[in-house]
Amino acid sequence: MQEITTVVLDAMGGDHAPGEMVKGAIDAVNMRDDIKVILVGQEDVIKEEIGKYQYPEDKIGIVHAEEVIETAEPPVNAIRKKKNSSIVVGMNMVKNKEADAFVSAGSSGAILVGGQVIVGRIRGIERPPLAPIIPTESGVSLLIDCGANVDARPSHLVQFAKMGSIYMEHVVGIKNPRVAIVNIGAEEDKGNALVKETFPLLKACTDINFVGSIEAREIPHGGADVIVCEAFVGNVILKLYEGLSSTLISLVKQGMMSSVTSKIGAAMALPALKKTLKEFDASKYGGAPLLGLNGLVVKTHGSAKAMEVTNSIIQCVTFKNEDINGKIKKNIIVSEEKTEA
Amino acid sequence: MQEITTVVLDAMGGDHAPGEMVKGAIDAVNMRDDIKVILVGQEDVIKEEIGKYQYPEDKIGIVHAEEVIETAEPPVNAIRKKKNSSIVVGMNMVKNKEADAFVSAGSSGAILVGGQVIVGRIRGIERPPLAPIIPTESGVSLLIDCGANVDARPSHLVQFAKMGSIYMEHVVGIKNPRVAIVNIGAEEDKGNALVKETFPLLKACTDINFVGSIEAREIPHGGADVIVCEAFVGNVILKLYEGLSSTLISLVKQGMMSSVTSKIGAAMALPALKKTLKEFDASKYGGAPLLGLNGLVVKTHGSAKAMEVTNSIIQCVTFKNEDINGKIKKNIIVSEEKTEA
């Protein structure tokens, strides 16, 4: 018998909740029969949305959660005080093994804090990194860490490299992924104190395919599969990716609309252009996993629509079926023991 | 009588040296009569290039320098050993007040090291930042620091903010420029240790228009005029800007060439599109100044062509005429004395 993956979905988080969240869940269970989705949030709101669709009833559940954590709320406080929020209720279900994964488009801060304090870290994992997939010219790369772990230490970055490598190989399907550390030059002696200390540690890892430093210029060209950095730098890369892509695409549109001739040209070129630019859209790869937890927590974009939600749910199935947490435990614990020996 | 600005130009540095360097110099002196350019490098090579042009002979000089520092050379070593290189000879001329500024498209590392050890810092300046201009949707911003000062301290960032503000106002011409610090959230309590310590110091500065944190996403949208960060982050932003722009533009071209219809459309839209994208090209603003030195050192792109060289030379005239170093000295020394009092 096929094993079922149970995913708790935060029906209340994100710019397009609950509509797109519910639609994403319905699409996922209609697409595959190895998924059960539990929608967590205000029951009446969810029921109204869900009434619009046809779906296998045993594959959708609802768990009521009265409160909603807003994006602007201080996360630590919100997680502590709002015990009946969709995020806290959903994460507790993962903690209590009632579900395999929790997916949310809600407050990043609350998801990061909740992941650590409610779901909890795998023993031996120092810090759980947030690892979004970013598009490149030749495919995608995993950017690890973009989370809240600022002022990281070298040992954290080494764990990020290992976990990212496992995820990229077994969830995304890149064999022997190239791991690189973000640096300001290609040479080994370049970098800040953190990178200089981390570089030889990564070089000494026999269980990853470490290819050295990567300059930010090479990231969009697909220079590595797993891009290791501390969270402040990762956040800058991720946000700049978003901001610059939208600026350039709006400039392209603006340019093509600036004369009558170019407007006609634009109308002819646009369908092909859109297709290409769609390839440069990370949402089809789902959300960003928070790795190293006793379970799985996935953060999707605040602007996520149904497709990204569906893909994030499917990503949880692969995560479970490939036993990523088992692989992380084995790898990290074996490595740590070796180091201590 | 009009005052002449004397700029030493490294004729040997950059991908297109000496041809484009010499052309840039000739264009500058033909365009304006308040500029003298001294070309430093291998005399016979320069003379051969220069022979191709008409120009006012008293406005171009040549100083022979036998050696060339290659991009791959370790910079500290190169500056120490190659006393007869174009970079060392040129910088010594600025140090000895034989010239107002030195412009080079050569080795970034050697230029940063040479600026500090040959030209030397203004008294009171802790670290000279490299401050390139980056294009945005609404104009340009100054990104300060992108240099070699990794692991900066809060006091460095405060000086960067002040120097950047002076440069942006008096050289680029933005009145009361908005100064922001790169951060991973808009709130004051967000950030790593460096940003958290620097934020209140910037907030307390009465001589700059500090507007708070800027997330990387807002940089391309023109969210601030002076973008303050430490060099590692600045380098990531600068390089990612370059890499992502080239990736997206190549994707746009690729997309438009993918069908017969779109090809015809592309041919019609391209001239207008090129014009818009040209606006998003930083080279017309010249090179990146290394601020806080006893003189001026400007680093242009390694790929710089004549136009960027000419603009970099003209930028030196504004720098001198506006007495930027005088303003920096006054501002920094006054602020430091206030702090100590």
Image (tube, coloured by chain):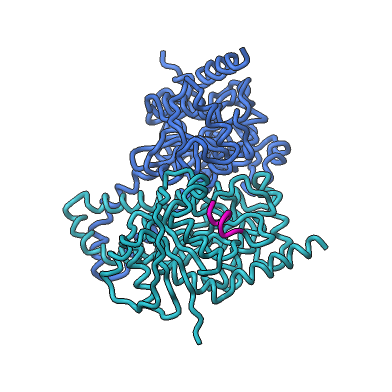
Chain colours: A blue, B cyan
Residue A315, placed above or below residue B290: above
Q: Is residue B119 magenta?
A: yes
Q: Is residue B100 magenta?
A: no
Query: Which image quadrant: the C terminus of chain B?
Result: bottom right
Residue B204 visible in the displayed image: yes
> In the depicted view, which residue is nearer to us: B129 or A229?
B129
Q: Residue furthest right?
A: B341
Residue B58, placed above or below residue B16: below
Q: Tell me if A189 is positioned left or right of B248 in this view.
A: right
Residue A239 visible in the displayed image: no
Q: Tell me if A124 is positioned left or right of B49 in this view.
A: right
Query: Residue drawn 58% across and 54% down?
Result: B117
Q: Residue furthest left?
A: B260
Residue B70 pos. (x, y %): 40, 48
> In the depicted view, which residue is nearer to us: A156 or A239?
A156
Query: Residue drawn 35% across and 62% down?
Result: B43
Range of the magenta residues?
A: B113-120
Residue B59 pos. (x, y %): 40, 76
Q: Residue furthest bottom?
A: B1
Residue A3 pos. (x, y %): 45, 17
Residue A226, placed above or below residue B151: above
In terms of image quadrants, where is residue B212?
bottom right
> In the depicted view, which residue is nearer to us: B30 or A137?
B30
